[in-house]
Image: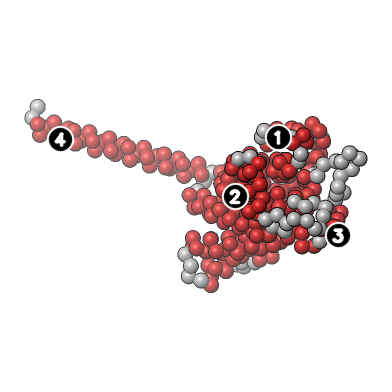
Amino acid sequence: MSSNTLKQAADAARTKSSNMGKQSTETVAAVKTDFLHTPLMRAALPFINGGLSGMVATTVIQPVDMIKVRLQLAGEGVATGPKPSPVSITRDIIAQGKVRDLYTGLSAGLLRQAVYTTARLGFFDTIMKNLTARAKEKGTQIGFAERAGSGLVAGGIAAFIGNPADLALIRMQSDGLKPLAERKNYKSVIDALSSIVKSEGVTALWAGATPTVVRAMALNLGQLACFSEAKAQLKTRTTLSPKVQTLTASAIAGFFASFLSLPFDFVKTRLQKQQRGPDGKLPYKSMADCFAKVAKQEGLLRFYRGFGTYYVRIAPHAMVTLIVVDYLGFLTI
């Protein structure tokens, strides 16, 4: 056999192999596309993308959340005394243990996002799609009222479902404030949840559920509704790129989410941290009782203590979450 014949045979084999590889790649891509466009996956993707984006954001922001909780619990029951700062609290946490203590409760935070953010973003996206489709049929456009209603409903449902994980997170983050002999030293979120159930009962997992739900509704009104509205306004009134629109809208949403939800977040933290005293009574009877006692004993401004830290926790978390969920939505179109 001549060398030319061998060369031709080799070229033909390479061409055939390349075509087979291309066909295989196209087949895999087609299967992937078909799978992503099945009715079940189209319904599930908003929830999956929401949960993943929330977990990424929580991993980034967890140290700020730890400091925010410690700020809210400092000076409980008194109006005077030393006023801690984010810097002093960070210094104390590191001095008492290790830098990684700033990530105390991360497992609870991730579980909370897997439940809470999965539900709130999933429900919000699903409700908004239905409202958009209905408005399109009528030849109209959805407004801020519809966006606000969607955010309130999605936030309330998600917060109630995710309350046990939120409670475990607060207990884990506040454990270091107790005397050494009284600390639980939770090993993980599962350990915290099981300990709470054993000592306080299953219903205790929904301690502080009312302010948690109200906080979530306020936060979602500020975050999701304002983000959606700001993005729509930026799209029609500016020439900013889609990425800059998302970044700007998420920063705007972060401010309103922080301002509207911080008082409820403050009360939620106090209610979830409280435990029965020697007399068997809890410090606060309800959300209203907590609001009243804090206002009387510590002053109205106490509800906004740590606003800067809270904003630094909420705004970047919102920005990372919304940017990641936008990107995941683009990948799964």
Which residue is at 60% across, 53% downward? 317
Q: Which mark is residue 61?
A: 2
Most distant residue in the bottom direction:
237
- Front residue of 58 and 15: 58
Which residue is at 13% across, 31% downward? 6
Most distant residue in the right direction:
279
Local packing at callout 2 (Cα closer than 10 Å; few below 14, some 14-19, many 20+) is many
Left or right position of 303 against 13 = right
Which corner quadrant of the image does residue 172 belong to?
top right
- Mark 3–mark 1 Cα distance, whole angstroms, equals 33 Å
Mark toward the start of the polypeptide (2 vs 1): 2
Mark toward the start of the polypeptide (3 vs 1): 1
Measured from the top left, where is residue 316 in percent x and y? 58, 55
* The N terminus sits in image quarter: top left
Local packing at callout 1 (Cα closer than 10 Å; few below 14, some 14-19, many 20+) is few
Which corner quadrant of the image does residue 276 belong to?
top right
- Front residue of 139 and 62: 62
Measured from the top left, where is residue 197 in percent x and y? 78, 34
Looking at the rendered image, the disc whose residue lies closer to the viewer, 2 or 1, is 1
- Front residue of 241 and 6: 241
Q: Which residue is mark 1?
A: 185
- Mark 2 vs 1: CB contact within 8 A: no
Looking at the rendered image, the disc whose residue lies closer to the viewer, 4 or 2, is 2
